Image (tube, helix red, strand yellow):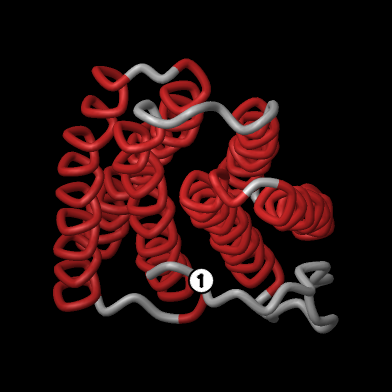
């Protein structure tokens, strides 16, 4: 009976942590969507909302880490249960970084809103961000459903995001060469594009963690990377 009670308490702890992960994931999906929308529509009020909301994402990561540490200390999980707790910690760290990139995008909205638009660049960035948002949704669904196949498909889709980034990178270079007045705006837009590309990388990391959780092994094949540019990422 005591063992059953301990197991039941452990299950409740895990359910609580996983509920926090899904809540955090929902906030991060919103950050991706709203930061891209604020950029495309030049909505500085929405951009400020994204920046303020990042505090809630950070707070959830801290809470998840504390709860996970408590579970490890009190329950001493082994094998699959320990793998689940460690996976949760890594997923929350990736979600926090994606939220940071969303905040970085929002920070540049107020700057870019004072500059002349550069073609349909913000619309293209919004489409790229939408793909990353959908990848994140599927990665979180794969986590809930313990679906390694769905997680693998998310990893493969990161190459599409890289291709979109490469296309934007070439466009920005062209715009800057055609008119030096575009240089400042294009540099900001490039950093945003790189932020979105990095979001895709972190979503891919989440998908890899799901595969590890389900199979006990990390993916054997290196993830496909189509980012051939040499610009350093903004940290």
Q: Is residue 213 left or right of residue 102?
A: right
> Which image quadrant: the C terminus?
bottom left
Helix, strand or loop for disc 1:
loop
Looking at the image, how many numbered discs can be counted on the residues?
1
Place residue 173 in its image quadrant: bottom right
> In the picture shown, does residue 142 fall above or below 71?
above
> Which image quadrant: the N terminus?
bottom left
Q: Is residue 157 left or right of residue 144?
A: right
> In the picture shown, does residue 72 fall above or below 47?
below
1 and 128: which one is in front? 128
Q: Determine if residue 152 is in view.
A: no
Place residue 81 in its image quadrant: bottom left
Q: Residue at x 24, y 55 (%)?
A: 61
State the image coordinates of residue 35 (x, y, percent, origin top left). 42, 32
Q: Determine if residue 180 is in view.
A: yes
State the image coordinates of residue 227 (x, y, percent, origin top left). 76, 69
Q: Which residue is drawn at 35% across and 42% down?
A: 108
Q: Is residue 49 left or right of residue 166?
A: left
Q: Residue at x 35, y 28 (%)?
A: 114
Q: Which residue is drawn at 14% across and 68% down?
A: 70
State the image coordinates of residue 231 (x, y, percent, origin top left). 60, 74
In the rendered image, which residue does mark 1 sit on? Answer: 233
State the image coordinates of residue 44 (x, y, percent, origin top left). 28, 22
């Amino acid at each position: 009976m005591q063992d059953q009670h301990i197991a039941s308490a452990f299950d409740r702890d895990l359910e609580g942590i996983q509920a926090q992960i899904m809540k955090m994931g929902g906030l991060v999906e919103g950050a991706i969507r709203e930061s891209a929308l604020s950029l495309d529509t030049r909505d500085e009020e929405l951009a400020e909302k994204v920046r303020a909301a990042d505090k809630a994402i950070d707070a959830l990561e801290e809470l998840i880490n504390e709860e996970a540490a408590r579970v490890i200390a009190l329950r001493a999980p082994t094998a699959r249960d320990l793998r689940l707790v460690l996976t949760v910690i890594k997923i929350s760290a990736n979600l926090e970084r994606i939220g940071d990139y969303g905040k970085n995008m929002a920070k540049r909205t107020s700057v870019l809103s004072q500059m002349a638009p550069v073609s349909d660049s913000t619309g293209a960035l919004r489409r790229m961000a939408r793909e990353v948002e959908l990848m994140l949704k599927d990665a979180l669904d794969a986590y809930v459903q313990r679906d390694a196949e769905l997680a693998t498909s998310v990893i493969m889709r990161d190459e599409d995001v890289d291709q979109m980034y490469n296309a934007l990178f070439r466009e920005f270079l062209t715009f800057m060469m055609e008119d030096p007045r575009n240089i400042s705006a294009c540099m900001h837009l490039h950093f945003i594009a790189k932020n979105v590309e990095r979001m895709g990388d972190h979503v891919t990391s989440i998908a890899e963690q799901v595969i590890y959780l389900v199979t006990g092994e990390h993916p054997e094949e290196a993830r496909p990377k189509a980012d051939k540019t040499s610009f350093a990422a903004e940290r």
